[in-house]
Image (cartoon, rainbow, N blue to C red):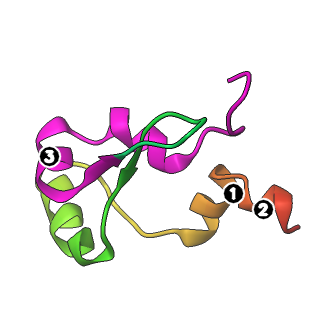
Amino acid sequence: MSDGDWPEMVTSRALTLLPRDLRARLAKSVPTALNGDYLEIPLTAEIELVAALQERGFEVTRDDDLINQLDGYAFLYA
């Protein structure tokens, strides 16, 4: 990315990683001015999303510290 975020926002990676049907049902794509679209998943969808991914064989755990590191938060506030 020449004029956007680095590392790429975790929420924008979700656009390609999350199965399409789950994106359509539980989230919405939100545009940004410089960084392209990102996926907004409301906290109220967390339980349903985790259950749907587990049914498909994904191992799902919540790790806010890891997400903050992947999203660059740790670099900014270390």
Label 1: few (<14), some (14–19) or many (≥20) C-alpha neighbours in 10 Å: some
Q: Amino acid at mark 3?
A: Ala
Q: Label 1 to label 3, Cα distance in Å?
A: 27 Å
Q: Nearer the viewer, residue 37 or 43?
A: 37
Asked if the stretch drawn in magenta spans residue 2, the answer is: yes
Asked if the stretch drawn in magenta spans residue 70, the answer is: no
Label 3: few (<14), some (14–19) or many (≥20) C-alpha neighbours in 10 Å: few
* Range drawn in magenta: 1-29
SS class, disc 3: helix
Question: Between disc 2 and disc 1, whose residue precedes?
Answer: 1
The image shows residue 48, relative to residue 54, as above or below, that is below
Q: Residue at x 21, y 46 (%)?
A: 23
Question: Between disc 1 and disc 3, whose residue precedes?
Answer: 3
Q: Residue at x 61, y 38 (%)?
A: 8
Q: Nearer the viewer, residue 8 or 30?
A: 30
Q: Residue at x 43, y 38 (%)?
A: 37
**Which tag is nearer the camera, tag 2 or tag 3?**
3
Q: Quadrant of the C terminus?
A: bottom right
Q: Which mark is residue 24?
A: 3
Q: Residue at x 58, y 36 (%)?
A: 35
Residue 29 left/right relative to 69: left
Q: Amino acid at mark 1?
A: Gln
Q: Which residue is mark 1?
A: 69
Q: Which residue is mark 2?
A: 74
Q: Label 2 to label 1, Cα distance in Å?
A: 5 Å
